Image (cartoon, rainbow, N blue to C red):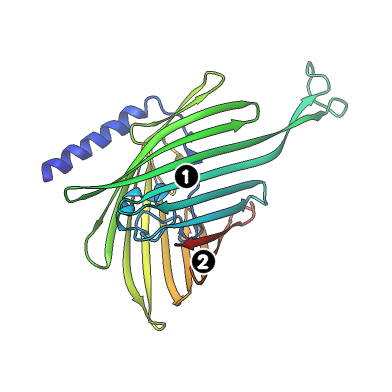
Amino acid sequence: MLKFYKNSLFFVILIFLCSNLFATKYAGEIFRMGAGVKNFALGNCGLTDENSYAPAYWNSALLIKATNNKFEIMHAEEYMGLLTYDTASAIWGNENKFSLVITRIGIADIPLTKLTDPTIEPDSLNRPYEYKSVNNSDLVVYFGFARKIGNYNIGFTPKIAYRHLAEENGFGFGADISTFFELSEKWMIAAKIRDFFTTQILWGNGTHEIVNPGFDLETKYKFIFPVIKRSSNFYTGFEIFTENRGDASNISLSFFSLDYHLGLEMNIHEKADLYIGYDINHFTSGISIGYRNWKINYSLELDTNDLDNSHRVSISLDL
């Protein structure tokens, strides 16, 4: 068993080091927007959340623990409404569960400008003017599968993307691999390799972008919250990037960088859950209120960079 882990670790490190020779920095940001209101409110923790509506995004291996079919539709507005982010998530199947997550990122009415006389420098008489406006959008589809291989729970998530930026179109394809381990009735740990074997983005103008592999690790601990005596979950996790992100991450170690996440989930009523979290220098919070099999969910991220707060709302149904 020890030899297996050593060989696996060596193989993963080899992939990371080789891919960095060709990867495009920040090319994979469209795959890191998260999915679901609850997990956003938990500081973008979700690898160990077996009740998530979007395991295809977070950890497809958790489909092994799924007991019912369900779906969620979410809408989000960020940066004072300049960016919209929408997702549709579903879990269905009888003996073998399958997960589908569809996300769309949109930025509308981006002005393109020209100078009145492009042959000279801009000044008070040669000012730029808007000659047209364009829209940017990214559509990503995640397919989640899970299998139990021996004592291991393995999740596989193929993903495809369509990108439309200004006047250029592109297609992307890749996959994630994930797993989880239940160390006790209260403690779970999960891991995921993002963009395993790299993710490719091919543009119509001939440009070729490569997304670096990354590694996610998360733990969840179940406990009874003091005073209110209600069941709760505490999440802690981090993401490792292999593209020298520098100050863009919480911790930077040259080639490697790390972002950490914290989340606390409290069941405050039979039909209500409260969430708080911390996500890369931002505090998050949210609430879910249920009625029969339906839930209305809301989350808020407090922004510290004068870009306004981010809001997400969704409606979900357990069948």
Numbered disc in front, either 2 or 1: 2
**132 on left or right of 11:** right
- Inspect this view and state whether residue 275 appears: yes
Residue at image location 44% in from the left, 56% down from the top: 53
Viewer-nearest residue: 203 or 254: 203
Q: Which residue is disc 1 drawn over?
A: 32
Which x, y percent locates residue 113? Answer: 76, 29
In space, the residues marked 2 and 1 are separated at their CA atoms by: 27 Å
Residue at image location 43% in from the left, 32% down from the top: 173
Residue at image location 52% in from the left, 50% down from the top: 88
Q: Please state which amino acid type lies under the numbered disc 2.
A: Trp
Q: Earlier in the sequence, mark 2 or mark 1?
A: 1
* Disc assigned to residue 294: 2
Q: Secondary structure at mark 2?
A: strand
Question: Which residue is outermost to the front?
Answer: 94
Viewer-nearest residue: 269 or 243: 269
